[in-house]
Amino acid sequence: MATGLRSWLLALCVTLLHVKRTSSKIVDGTIDIREDWTFLTRFCYKDSVGELKYHFEYPESYATQNIFLYFDTQWPNVYPKPEMTCLDKEDKVYRGNNQVVNLTTSYVWSGCEKKQLLNKTYLECIGDRRFVSSRERWWYIAVSNCKSTKGLLLKYRLEMTNGDTFWRKHFSADERYILPMDIAFFIIFSILWLLGIHIASQLTSRRLFHFSYKLYLCSMTFEVLSLMFYLIYYIEFGKKGIEKYGISVVGRACHYISHVVFLIMLILMAKGWTVTRGRISSSGQIKLSIFGTVYTVCFAVLFFYEAAVFDPGEVLYIYESPAGIGICVLRVIAWLWFCYGTFFTLKHYPNKSNFYYPFWLIYTAWFLAGPIMVVISAYRIPKWERAQIVNGIDWCISILAHAVFLVITRPSAANSNFPFHMRTNQIGIQEAAPSGPTDNGVAYYTPPLPSAPPPYSPQQPGHFTDITSMFMVSGGTNGKLLYPPANSPNGLQNPYPPMNGTQNGGMNGIPMMTISPS
């Protein structure tokens, strides 16, 4: 199981590191196309004063080129509309709002001047525009020359800002609160991670540090790493205004890896792994491996789809894609699997209801929160607020999910929800023991009383760990399985009446009995 999980994580990391994209709030480059109208970039300005500083340069033989500034309610009327002519698209802008910049010396507000370079005449235009609006608004910048027979040729540099402070200047209005929120989330997750390490040390001392808890720590570690990379990305972006997309990809990859690990851990624990059983059947391992692989591939495809298919001229949510829809469907399937595993674990081990009832209720909300959030974000949240709202909700859900797991697995005598009563060395013997009715022995789990506190591990006089109390051994005839003696010399007691079938589902209908010590 651990090997398969490591393979998924490695495959996802390698795949995502090959995804590249160019986008920033300071953009520069050259347009050289045969078309007479094209989209350049977009930016969400806040409801107060925003600013655009520009620097354009092009040969005079391509004059006159124009810059058109469309706001968000005008843009759907011209893009994407390949059937519209250049003049039709220009007519959608009201020129009285100063939404057109003619890149020519005859238009004094453009800041254009002629210059000679290599015996050619060029137009160089340097200027700025300010944006005032009643609310946050997406603005789209396009270039046109409807009279051109050669197309467009334009070298450009644009700097779009939302104020002068570090927290606002280069950030689009839809993401201006992301950095403060991520700082708070990083602090909270770091505290949870340290508490998790502390509890892990307690579990280790009591031989209760199961692999399921290791998966939980792994998930939380990737969340901390994700927030750390996001902070590096946004701080660098706030300083320079140029996006370092590679850092963002690593941060998002860590977040997705944490999500996959946490989801697999929940399904495994719903099936009773490390709580009521020491291993998952071979068919269960195969099914989980296939599911985890498909889930990971969908996340990788999501990155490629965003980079290669998403139209930069439209404000799209990352889950508005086939891969995003596939992830939502797989998450619902994972929830159904989670419910199925919890139901049958409770059916066979009702004494674990104190743990599994709140476990199922809380993490049902976690499973379904993702698809619900995608639907609400795609259809109800305004596009000029979506990025920061989705970021806040996503991380709040993750923090609550990890914090609740930390609470219900704390090894406290007052914690009636504590799930682990098998020690790690006992699980090791269970995995090695045969499990068929004709084998030489059957791994057996003796359930604790419903009100039993977490087991302790001090080796005090008169107290010791006896792992034989967790198993039955087969008799010499007819393969009958025997409980530990009712009054054995080492002081073991059997508080449970004879039962029909083993607790691990290995055998049903075989009578059990106690024997007297020889």
Image: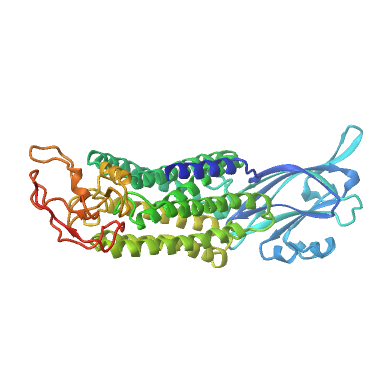
Query: Where does residue 343 sit, x and y in percent of width and height?
Result: 34, 65
Q: Quadrant of residue 242?
A: top right
Query: Where does residue 76 sit, x and y in percent of width and height?
Result: 70, 65
Q: Nearer the viewer, residue 190 or 126?
A: 190
Query: Where does residue 44 sit, x and y in percent of width and height?
Result: 61, 55
Is residue 419 shown left or right of residue 225? Answer: left
Is residue 15 shown left or right of residue 214? Answer: right
Query: Where does residue 281 sit, x and y in percent of width and height?
Result: 39, 53
Q: Nearer the viewer, residue 478 or 16?
A: 478
Is residue 127 shown left or right of residue 320? Answer: right
Display colour scheme? rainbow
Marker count (numbered): 0
Q: Residue at x 31, y 40 (%)?
A: 197
Q: Residue at x 59, y 46 (%)?
A: 170
Is 280 rendered above or below residue 241? below
Q: Nearer the viewer, residue 332 or 315?
A: 332
Q: Residue at x 59, y 43 (%)?
A: 15
Query: Can see residue 212?
Result: yes
Query: Can see residue 450?
Result: no
User: In this view, which residue lies farthest toward the top?
Assistant: 118
Q: Residue at x 65, y 55 (%)?
A: 131
Q: Quadrant of residue 316?
A: bottom right
User: In this view, which residue lies farthest toward the front?
Assistant: 477
